């Protein structure tokens, strides 16, 4: 049994829900004002039990050059160093000509999975014989996609364990397309059920290996120099770190986390489903049976060559894209027009992010650059107001071990000294 204040919560108006939550959780008036200050009335129609918008800081990565064009890329993230690192990596690559991005094909996969199959080979043959009809069923379920030149284009049959997966390869044009794919897959499932097959499930697959983007870049050694290291030795260490991420899943996970720091932030700001991109990335990283780093770096002459291939089934229209006012503004900022362009920019950002992380790891380590930014977040998390942040950070920098307790103590002392407490 839920508590009283929870009863019928979803049926209440937005303001009633906020008031009930404050009542039931004993939140104070300031908390209520915060819920109200961040609310967007239309979002009440988007999620169940809506109470407010959860806000994240948004910034822009600057100077990301992809296929000869310089982009300003909106990124939404709470991690302080991410946007600084993205711009840093982008700048180093831009000095050597920028990124080259390519999207060869862009199909989403809808799976219709059959179970209790007695004779898998015969069923496979039968299904392949009827592939045109099945594609027609899929396209009839979403005629507008076909009219726009997209739709279900190919059918592929895979025998997996005791199952048969009927994979529909669907061109969703400029959309993110999950709903289209699921509608088509369910229509095919219904058709197969009517033909006597046992359908276990019909759903999009997030292993979007038919929507791969490949980005490459060449970085001159001289763009990698630090005060303590020459460019060639930085490049060599980056190449070694890349090798490590190919052989050690423990390191590969962190290597890829760094890439996804940039990718998730840009995907989120673009209004796309970042969980879909995350799951596709990690599934693709494990495609050989071992989880590996998605980005690689090798040496060639006086240059470090970077490469990243990964699923990037992002769209620029439909679904949640351009749902929030901010995501609409973000397309004005980035000036990105097509799904292919967006995929190339986001993957380039991931590679830039990886370069910045590996360069830091190969030289001074990650903490040196991070700490100033982390201290700012720490200062704010213990309640420092804007004018208190800089003095608090400069005091924290004098300590070897810094944590929230120390930050709180210094803040209290600062306030006592200034008579603000
Ligand atoms: C931190 O958010 C990401 C890094 O750990 C990535 C990496 O180690 O490559 C710095």
Image: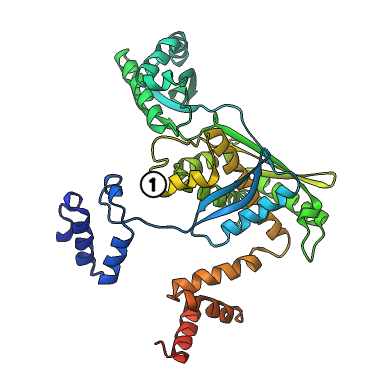
Asked whether, in this view, residue 280 is left or right of residue 243, the answer is left
Q: Is residue 130 above or below residue 295?
A: above
Q: Is residue 285 above or below residue 237?
A: above
For the residue pair 379 and 386, the one nearer the viewer reads as 386
Residue at the disc numbered 1 = 324
Residue beneath the point at 39% across and 16% down: 118
Helix or strand or loop: what does disc 1 sit on?
Answer: loop
- Residue 155 coordinates in the image, percent (x, y): 48, 18
For the residue pair 155 and 113, the one nearer the viewer reads as 155
Asked whether, in this view, residue 264 is left or right of residue 300, the answer is left
Residue beneath the point at 34% across and 55% down: 53
Q: Is residue 71 above or below residue 284?
A: below
For the residue pair 170 and 89, the one nearer the viewer reads as 89
- Residue 341 coordinates in the image, percent (x, y): 57, 36
Q: Which part of the image, by quadrant, shows the N terminus?
A: bottom left
Asked whether, in this view, residue 62 is left or right of residue 126, the answer is right
Q: Which part of the image, by quadrant, shows the C terminus?
A: bottom left
Would residue 176 be seen by someone viewing this image from the given angle? Answer: yes
- Residue 137 coordinates in the image, percent (x, y): 37, 15
Residue 228, by quadrant, is bottom right
């Amino acid at each position: 049994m839920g508590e009283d204040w929870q009863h019928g919560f979803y049926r209440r108006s937005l303001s009633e829900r906020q008031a009930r939550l404050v009542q039931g959780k004993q939140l104070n008036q300031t908390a209520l004002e915060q819920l109200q200050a961040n609310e967007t009335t239309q979002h009440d129609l988007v999620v169940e039990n809506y109470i407010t918008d959860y806000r994240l800081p948004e910034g822009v990565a600057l100077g990301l050059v992809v296929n000869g064009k310089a982009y300003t890329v909106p990124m939404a993230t709470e991690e302080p160093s991410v946007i600084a690192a993205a711009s840093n990596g982008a700048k180093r690559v831009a000095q050597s000509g920028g990124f080259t991005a390519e999207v060869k094909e862009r199909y989403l996969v809808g799976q219709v999975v059959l179970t209790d199959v007695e004779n898998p080979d015969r069923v496979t043959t039968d299904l392949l014989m009827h592939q045109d009809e099945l594609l027609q069923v899929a396209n009839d379920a979403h005629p507008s996609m076909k009219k726009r030149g997209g739709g279900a284009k190919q059918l592929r049959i895979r025998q997996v364990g005791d199952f048969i997966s009927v994979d529909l390869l669907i061109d969703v044009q400029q959309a993110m397309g999950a709903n289209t794919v699921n509608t088509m897959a369910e229509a095919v499932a219904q058709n197969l059920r009517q033909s006597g097959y046992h359908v276990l499930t019909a759903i999009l697959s997030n292993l979007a290996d038919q929507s791969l983007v490949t980005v490459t870049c060449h970085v001159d050694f001289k763009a990698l120099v630090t005060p303590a290291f020459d460019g060639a030795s930085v490049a060599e260490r980056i190449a070694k770190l890349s090798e490590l991420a190919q052989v050690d899943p423990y390191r590969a996970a962190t290597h890829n986390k760094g890439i996804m720091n940039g990718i998730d932030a840009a995907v989120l700001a673009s209004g796309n489903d970042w969980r879909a991109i995350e799951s596709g990335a990690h599934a693709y990283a494990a495609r050989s049976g071992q989880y590996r780093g998605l980005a690689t770096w090798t040496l060639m002459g006086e240059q470090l060559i970077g490469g990243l291939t990964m699923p990037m089934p992002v769209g620029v229209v439909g679904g949640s894209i351009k749902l929030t006012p901010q995501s609409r503004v973000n397309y004005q900022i980035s000036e990105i027009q097509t799904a292919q362009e967006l995929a190339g920019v986001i993957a380039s950002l991931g590679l830039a992010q990886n370069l910045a992380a590996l360069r830091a790891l190969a030289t001074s380590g990650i903490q040196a650059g991070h700490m100033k930014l982390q201290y700012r977040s720490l200062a704010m998390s213990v309640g420092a107001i804007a004018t208190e942040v800089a003095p608090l950070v400069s005091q924290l920098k004098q300590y070897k071990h810094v944590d929230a307790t120390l930050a709180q103590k210094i803040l209290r002392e600062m306030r006592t000294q200034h008579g603000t407490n």
